[in-house]
Amino acid sequence: MPHTSTSIITIERFIMEQERLHPEATGELSNLLYDLCLAAKIISRHVRRAGLTDILGSAGAVNVSGDLQQKLDLFAHDAVQNAVQHTGRVCIAVSEEDEEPMLCPPASRRGKYVILYDPLDGSTNIDVNVSIGTIFSIHRRVTARKGEPSLADCLQVGRKQVAAGYILYGSSTMLVYTTGQGVHGFTLDPTIGEFLLSHPDIRTPETGKYYSVNESNWNRWTPAVQRAVAAFKNGDGGGRMQAKNARYIGSLVADIHRNLISGGIFLYPADTRSSEGKLRLLYEAAPLALVVEQAGGAATDGRRPILDLVPKSLHQRTPLFIGSKADVAFASEILSTESVPA
């Protein structure tokens, strides 16, 4: 009779084992990650039932970033808020869907962490059953615990993140995160309702096989961006860059995840319509940059590392070049030849 192994590692067991390596840990961050796991399971359940329930389509409103809100956007937003705001682990929560941060009640139990998140990235793909995702960033509070949390707690440089990650709702639901000691991926087993370790210590290739960019924006890019994309598409002619395969889903988490595992570069440059870039620094670029850097990759705005950018506003946007380290360095070298507007 064949023997089936029962040696599985749940995310709870994995986090507890990591926590034991740090005797000073209080367990609050671990519990916050569990809270996010709960939100991920709730969102995953509704994503899988989206076509059977009244949760597809537009909600008829526009969020602070000017994007049309989908019903599932709002559901995911509420799922994360409800999972974290009453636990006493978080003092303030900031969502891409809200104009202002939300203070967590009650004031007497506000915790020492700040969470910033994009509840459902790629929501324009919801109605056509394409992979979507949740992105999260966790910082330690910098204001005094006895006082009111403030914008200073939210507007922190990316290198100060204590944890970051994403949840991908695709052919399976995966949670990928880092606390600064490597990147680990967990796949949800719906039969037991647990995230199981499936991708330990993810390392992205130094040079990738894919490039991911929305080439319909070509005519709005600067000449330097066009040269970089042309080199990824056709090779650079000098042997430094071999031609890559184009893979673009149009769902940020899905594109980043594929390139993280298989190697490649994702580009979302500024253009004549979006001179500051399109992606949000705090909810999208910074957390994904931490994950990719921890896996051996790189992320820049074309000139500076994303994790070194000092945010000036909650919904600040940025260009993003992210993925395999050699590919990002190649793009940055080309972009550095372009003069910076005064």
Image (tube, helix red, strand yellow):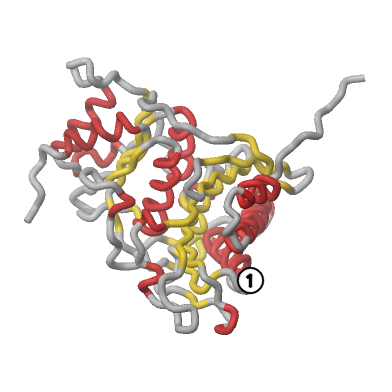
Q: Residue at x 48, y 67 (%)?
A: 114
Q: Residue at x 44, y 31 (%)?
A: 204
Position of residue 263 relative to residue 60, above or below, is above
Q: Residue furthest right?
A: 1
Position of residue 238 relative to residue 227, above or below, is above
User: 313 or 295: nearer the eye?
Assistant: 295
Q: Which residue is mark 1?
A: 87
- Residue 177 in picture, x, y percent from top left: 53, 47
Is 140 positioned to the left or the right of 28 in the image?
left
Image quadrant occupied by the C terminus: bottom left
Q: Residue at x 18, y 50 (%)?
A: 272
Is 79 positioned to the left or the right of 191 in the image?
left
Residue type at the position of mark 1: Thr
Answer yes or no: is residue 271 visible.
Answer: yes
Q: Residue at x 63, y 39 (%)?
A: 172
User: 247 or 340: nearer the eye?
Assistant: 340
- Residue 270 in picture, x, y percent from top left: 23, 48
Determine the image quadrant of residue 220.
Answer: top left
Answer yes or no: is residue 55 visible.
Answer: no
Position of residue 303 relative to residue 53, above or below, is above
Q: Secondary structure at mark 1?
A: loop
- Residue 324 in picture, x, y percent from top left: 36, 32
Total numbered badges shown on the rendered structure: 1
- Residue 151 in picture, x, y percent from top left: 37, 74
Sort mark 1 into few (<14), some (14-19) or many (20+) by Cα contacts within 10 Å.
some
Image quadrant occupied by the N terminus: top right
